[in-house]
């Protein structure tokens, strides 16, 4: 039997099912007919994990309680909730077509980072200065251009212009070197779609770094610290 620790933030009464294996899907659907269950997974003899509208919940196997909170396996010291979140992030990250990203490729790629970056973000500029260290360590960097303050700001126009440039890598380099580029350029671009990706990934600021396994590094880190995260 696994030892489970749950940090509770809310408990919702679901039903008074008998103390036996319950059809969790049916119980939740009956209690909340307008809810669509995206995923249902049994954790152990006590709990099921349920994903509803991309949010993670836990249901007791007797069908009595629906729980919001973080679940930690005390035997392995792993967060079951965080592992599921990593899987969710990977689905979104892997759905972002490479043609929608500005990619910095090393001579040999051993690892890939996906980074949401913004033209008006000083810490994005600082992280950009770490790219040489990442590339030298065979780490490919894929930028997702994301105007964190929306469309009605100069940074949005700069990102669109960078995307529409003949050489996107050089255009992004210029922006992070402090050079303004022609912000009248227009073309079909992924900037609006990137807002949707950012929302799905709960990106609230830039830079936000996603590792290959779905882990997240919020904010600026030196390339040495990023390497340590990767190896951990």
Image: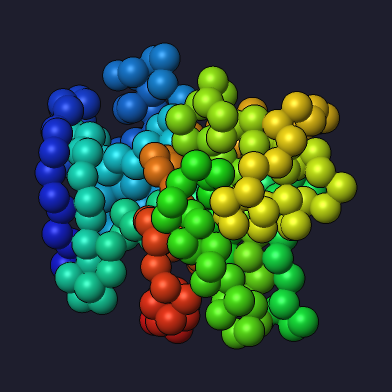
User: Would residue 92 be found to the left or right of residue 3 on screen?
Assistant: right
Image vertical order of residue 109 relative to residue 68, above or below: below
User: Would residue 117 be found to the left or right of residue 208 on screen?
Assistant: right
Residue at point 74%, 35% (across, down): 182
**How many numbered discs sit on the rendered protein?**
0
Residue at point 70%, 65% (across, down): 104
Residue at point 48%, 54% (across, down): 124
Which residue is situated farthest in the top direction here?
34
Is residue 212 visible in this depiction of the protein? no
Which picture quadrant has residue 138? bottom right
User: Would residue 202 be found to the left or right of residue 71 on screen?
Assistant: right
Residue at point 83%, 53% (across, down): 167
- Expressed as whole percent of the image width and height from the top left, the position of residue 50 reads 37, 41
Q: Nearer the viewer, residue 40 or 121?
A: 121
Which picture quadrant has residue 128? bottom right
- Expressed as whole percent of the image width and height from the top left, the position of residue 213 reads 51, 66
Query: Considering the image in quadrants, where does the C terminus appear?
Result: bottom left
Q: Nearer the viewer, residue 206 or 24?
A: 206
Query: Considering the image in quadrants, where does the N terminus appear?
Result: bottom left
- Expressed as whole percent of the image width and height from the top left, the position of residue 122 reads 43, 51
- Expressed as whole percent of the image width and height from the top left, the position of residue 212 reads 55, 67
Image vertical order of residue 218 relative to residue 27, above or below: below
Q: Nearer the viewer, residue 124 or 11?
A: 124
């Amino acid at each position: 039997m696994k030892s489970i620790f749950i940090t509770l933030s809310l408990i919702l009464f679901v039903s008074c099912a008998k103390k036996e294996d319950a059809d969790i899907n049916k119980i939740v659907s009956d209690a909340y007919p307008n809810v669509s269950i995206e995923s249902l997974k049994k954790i152990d003899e006590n709990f099921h994990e349920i994903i509803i509208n991309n949010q993670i919940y836990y249901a007791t196997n007797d069908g009595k309680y629906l729980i919001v909170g973080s679940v930690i396996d005390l035997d392995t010291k792993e967060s079951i909730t965080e592992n599921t979140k990593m899987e969710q992030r990977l689905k979104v990250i892997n759905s972002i077509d490479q043609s929608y990203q500005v990619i910095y490729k090393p001579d040999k790629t051993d690892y890939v980072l996906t980074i949401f970056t913004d033209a008006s973000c000083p810490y994005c500029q600082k992280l950009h200065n770490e790219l040489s260290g990442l590339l030298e360590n065979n780490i490919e960097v894929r930028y997702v251009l994301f105007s964190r303050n929306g469309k009605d700001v100069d940074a949005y126009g700069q990102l669109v212009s960078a995307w529409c440039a003949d050489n996107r890598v050089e255009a992004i380099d210029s922006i992070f070197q402090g050079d303004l580029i022609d912000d009248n350029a227009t073309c079909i671009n992924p900037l609006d779609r990137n807002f949707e990706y950012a929302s799905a990934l709960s990106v609230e600021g830039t830079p936000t770094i996603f590792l290959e396994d779905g882990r997240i590094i919020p904010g600026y880190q030196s390339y040495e610290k990023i390497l340590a995260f990767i190896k951990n």
